[in-house]
Image: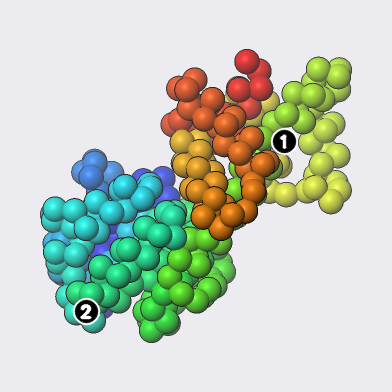
Amino acid sequence: MRYGFLGLGIMGGAMAHNLLQAGHSLMVWNRNLDKCAPLLEAGALPGDSPAHVAATCDVTFAMVSDPVAAEAVCLGPAGVLEGIRPGCGYVDMSTIDPATSRDLADAVTSSGARHLEAPVSGTKKPAEDGTLIILTAGDRSLYDEVGPLLDVMGKKRLFLGETGQAACMKLTVNMIMGGMMTAFSEGLHLARRSGLDTTDLLDVLASGALANPMFAGKGPLMEAGRFDPAFPLKHMEKDLRLALALGATLVQSLETAETAQSLFAQALEMGLGDCDMGAVHKVMES
């Protein structure tokens, strides 16, 4: 079996590397060709376009930034749809809205191929370590077929039913995470202005019911003003917007998510989009 991987950013590059390390034959493509270089050196084959990769490979994975990029890679000129063959598989691991995911699935299945949505929960380090949580929906036969590859990239995988359900799960998870991050940042600032040592706050949080890897990992970095991107802030703002749109579709009010999204939007206006999402901390300072 030959596999393809489209999109080699912070997440996709690490995920594709793990597939190579596991011994899978891989063809890769990225809009910025420089990002292909480490994988080509590790043994991957170069793809000329998404269409070329999909035409060559039995299953093609994609990990791109947003719905616009997902549509372009699949449906645009020289996109996956121009190359994919009947019976082959397309696994879209991007975080997009359920409506776009269903549109892509309809286009892929209309060509005789199979489609699986498979967004992931996790950031740079879990992607590197192969410990992502992979949320899937769509074609069950494709899910069963690529299960061993998903297990290389993640520590847990779920099949959630019809296309769109995995996207809903991913947006819900990231909406909660965005709200946690803004509340955490406000708490750090409140503690400092109260004259408390924020390391004591982090110790208290780590010792009780609020203990979690995000606070433990990002807290010291945020306090030190270090925002190297593990999960770029611009992507969190995008995910919050998509969650709010999903809430509107379902007539579900999301007041805390609206507040979180507005804070991340302010951070974008401050030019922090390419920083880690923890850079929302700087909005509180201003």
How far across and down, in percent of the image, does residue 12 sit?
Answer: 38, 53
Name the amino acid, label 2.
Gly
Using the image as rendered, state which of residue 23 and residue 194 is in the foreground: 194
What's the residue at 83%, 38% (across, down)? 203
How far across and down, in percent of the image, does residue 73 sit?
Answer: 24, 54
User: Which quadrant, please, contains the N terminus?
Assistant: bottom left
Query: Which residue in the rendered view is the most extreme toward the front?
Result: 251
Q: Secondary structure at mark 2?
A: loop
Residue 194 visible? The answer is: yes
Quarter of the image for residue 189 reads top right
* The label number, if any, that marks residue 184 in the structure image: 1
Q: Secondary structure at mark 1?
A: helix
* The label number, if any, that marks residue 112 in the structure image: 2
Distance between the alpha carbons at the discs numbered 2 and 1 = 47 Å
Q: Is residue 12 left or right of residue 250?
A: left
Vertical order, 34 against 265 (above or below): below
Q: Is residue 72 left or right of residue 253?
A: left
How many C-alpha atoms fall within 10 Å of the one at disc 1: few (<14), some, or many (≥20)? Answer: some
How far across and down, in percent of the image, does residue 81 sit?
Answer: 19, 65
* The label number, if any, that marks residue 2 in the structure image: none
